[in-house]
Image (cartoon, helix red, strand yellow):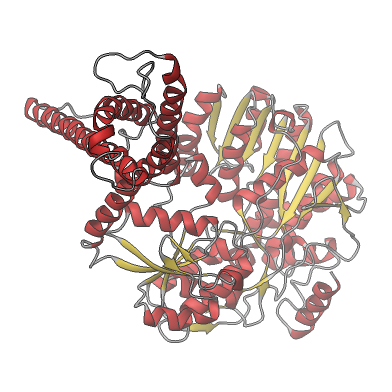
């Protein structure tokens, strides 16, 4: 941090002094106002009780001296009570129910003290010039009507003055909001009320809320902080035109993705800009501020309910164990590292091919790892390097291996089948055998839905990797588990970053086919469920994650264009390019010889793998490795076709017969 210069220190000191002086003056003025109001309240209470009589029986004739004794003491008591309740520490423009209740308490407490004095007057002999009763034996009491009336008037004057000051302050602030953006708040519930209150008090120069929209018909016509609930979504366009709205702010506590998709479509057709408030739980905990409005992201439209883990992190398969993560610099691998740290392993070993990626994840988790006392050991290397893998295994003896290293690009692997075999098949076998040799407890492999009825080399290579780990499960004490899921949002090389780049470039956005669908989930959710599956797995299983409903890629493209503030087909065109080699129209999670079994977690399912003879499978993996070394692409596809009965890479990767079969399979699932 840069050192402050003497001049800047002096400026800061004077600024703090002036602010302090201003606060003192403001408090004194407020105290003075309350003194005047309380004196007026008691005087007026006498006058009302005595019917404003003049002469005998009137205030001036009979009660003025009593007032001069009583008023200073009563006002002092109430001022001290108001001070103790914090009424002189806050800002009048924030006066609300809490402050009004404190004013009521202070004023009524003064009335109670005055009532006690009235009761005691019969026991107190006359003193000084204080009025006494007609018999001259004790002090004259305050008329009971005056006590009651004073309680009401003092409360009303003090509270009313503060509320008027608040309204006056808000009017002054309102005068500076001509250039503020006019905001329509969608949602008149607790979240909407909180947002409206915050914007009215703190953001007037930036956002000016003008009304609410809410689908609940019972709220129509109501007013919240002076803002009218205009009606439901069907009135959006008319209200926006009439109120000259610049932006819609979505203020819902837990909006469903389906509702958000509907809203986005409505906002797009009305050509309105829109934003969403942060997660309310994060606002409550203080991790984010309500002022941190953000655009609606594609993750909001595709997202699902937060994952609730059944296994406590301290009891998971990673807690208190040495953990190795391969592919540590990738999208899935880096998230595995981030979440693994929170399970407090005794050591975290990172293995990745890209030195920059390994450095980045090490940088991101370094501070948290140090805070939790977890040593992190990074390695730059390849799972295909048998000597390096065995060296790492001997040095660290990991108890849990999280295998995320893989080639995943369908197009590239279709053009370079040898690389898919070397990395996804041979690399998996090298790592798995090394895990057995070092006595690892668990080996958890990340698989893909493209391994089901694979239409391309990438999916087929991952299917062979599943076969390897399930078969090796019976050859030692290591529990081998595979977790199969679909596309993850925002991963490097996935369709969403590509679409965003195409939109930024002005289009067109390229989509393979109007009917092509994919499963999507967020990376944190996929990784959390993967660790959960690894903790409950007994070995030999393939776990499936609940991916929700499949999403049409063209709908995804349209939503991304809309979220960018543009109109599909007008500002940005969508171009259909046709399915590429190795791609499928629809993705699946189960093969024809597998069926889904429930687990303790409602979003995780188990399926058993067929039994394979290791010697038979090992010979075929050796043959694939030889073909990969020779670079014989066609022979590799032939070998995969022989090894995987439902592999269609040689026959009909893109034809209508395969698409129809996939359609039927998805409908049956």
Query: Which of the image's four quarters has the N terminus?
Result: top left
Residue 415's spot in the image, x, y percent?
60, 67
Query: Which of the image's four quarters has the C terminus?
Result: bottom right
Residue 627's spot in the image, x, y percent?
71, 57
Looking at this view, is 372 or 447 the one in front?
372
Is residue 564 placed above or below 162 in the rendered structure? below
Q: Image quarter for residue 54?
A: top left
Residue 136's spot in the image, x, y percent?
35, 18
Residue lying at the far left in this picture: please name it. 7
Residue 94 visible (yes or no): yes
Residue 509 visible (yes or no): no
Residue 155's spot in the image, x, y percent?
38, 42
Residue name at image x 60 percent, y 31 percent: 349
Q: Is residue 371 left or right of residue 133?
A: right
Is residue 121 placed above or below 403 in the rendered structure? above
Q: Image quarter for residue 318?
A: top right
């Amino acid at each position: 941090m840069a050192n402050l210069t003497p001049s800047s220190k002096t400026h800061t000191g004077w600024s703090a002094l002036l602010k302090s002086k201003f606060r003192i003056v403001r408090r004194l003025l407020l105290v003075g106002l309350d003194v005047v109001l309380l004196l007026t309240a008691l005087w007026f209470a006498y006058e009302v009780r005595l019917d404003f009589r003049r002469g005998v029986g009137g205030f001036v004739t009979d009660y003025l001296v009593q007032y001069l004794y009583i008023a200073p003491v009563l006002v002092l008591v109430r001022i001290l009570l108001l001070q103790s309740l914090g009424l002189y520490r806050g800002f009048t423009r924030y006066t609300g129910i809490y402050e009004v209740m404190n004013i009521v308490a202070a004023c009524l407490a003064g009335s109670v003290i005055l009532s006690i004095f009235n009761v005691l007057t019969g026991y107190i002999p006359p003193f000084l010039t204080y009025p006494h009763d007609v018999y001259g034996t004790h002090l004259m009491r305050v008329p009971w009507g005056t006590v009651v009336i004073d309680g009401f008037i003092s409360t009303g004057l003090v509270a009313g003055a503060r509320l008027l000051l608040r309204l006056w302050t808000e009017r002054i602030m309102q005068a500076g909001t001509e250039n503020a953006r006019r905001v329509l708040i969608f949602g008149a519930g607790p979240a909407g009320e909180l947002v409206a209150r915050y914007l009215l008090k703190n953001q007037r120069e930036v956002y000016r809320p003008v009304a609410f929209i809410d689908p609940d018909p019972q709220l129509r016509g109501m007013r919240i902080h002076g803002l009218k609930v205009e009606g439901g979504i069907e009135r959006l366009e008319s209200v926006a035109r009439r109120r000259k709205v610049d932006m819609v702010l979505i203020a819902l506590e837990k909006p469903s993705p389906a509702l958000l998709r509907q809203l986005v479509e409505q906002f797009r057709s009305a050509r309105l800009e829109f934003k969403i408030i942060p997660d309310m739980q994060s606002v409550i905990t203080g991790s984010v501020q309500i002022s941190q409005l953000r655009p609606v992201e594609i993750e909001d439209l595709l997202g699902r309910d937060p994952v609730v883990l059944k296994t406590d992190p301290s009891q998971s398969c990673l807690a208190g164990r040495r953990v190795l993560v391969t592919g540590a610099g990738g999208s899935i691998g880096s998230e595995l590292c981030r979440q693994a740290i929170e399970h407090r392993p005794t050591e975290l070993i990172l293995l990745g091919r890209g030195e920059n990626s390994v450095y980045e994840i090490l940088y991101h988790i370094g501070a948290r790892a140090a805070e939790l006392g977890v040593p992190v050991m990074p390695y730059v290397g390849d799972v295909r390097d048998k000597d390096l893998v065995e060296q790492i295994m001997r040095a660290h003896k990991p108890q849990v291996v999280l295998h995320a290293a893989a080639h995943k690009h369908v197009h590239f692997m279709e053009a370079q089948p040898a690389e898919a075999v070397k990395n996804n098949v041979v690399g998996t076998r090298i790592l798995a055998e090394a895990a057995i040799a070092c006595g690892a407890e668990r080996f958890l492999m990340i698989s893909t839905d493209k391994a089901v009825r694979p239409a391309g080399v990438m999916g087929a290579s991952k299917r062979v990797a599943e076969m390897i780990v399930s078969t090796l499960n019976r050859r030692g004490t290591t529990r081998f588990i595979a977790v199969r899921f679909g596309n993850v949002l925002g991963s490097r090389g996935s369709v969403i970053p590509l679409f965003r780049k195409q939109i930024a470039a002005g289009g067109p956005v390229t989509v393979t086919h109007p009917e092509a669908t994919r499963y999507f989930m967020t990376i944190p959710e996929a990784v959390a469920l993967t660790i959960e599956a690894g903790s409950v797995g007994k070995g030999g299983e393939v776990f499936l994650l609940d991916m929700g409903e499949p999403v049409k890629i063209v709908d995804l493209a349209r939503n991304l264009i809309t979220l960018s503030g543009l109109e599909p087909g007008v500002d940005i065109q969508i171009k259909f390019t046709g399915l590429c080699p190795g791609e499928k129209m629809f993705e699946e999670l189960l093969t024809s010889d597998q069926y889904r079994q429930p687990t303790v977690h409602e979003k995780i399912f188990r399926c058993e793998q067929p039994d394979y003879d290791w010697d038979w499978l090992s010979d075929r993996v050796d043959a694939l490795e030889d073909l990969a070394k020779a670079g014989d692409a066609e022979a590799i596809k032939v070998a995969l076709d022989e090894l995987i009965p439902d592999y269609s890479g040689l026959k009909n990767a893109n034809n209508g017969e395969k698409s129809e079969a996939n359609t039927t399979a998805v409908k049956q699932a």
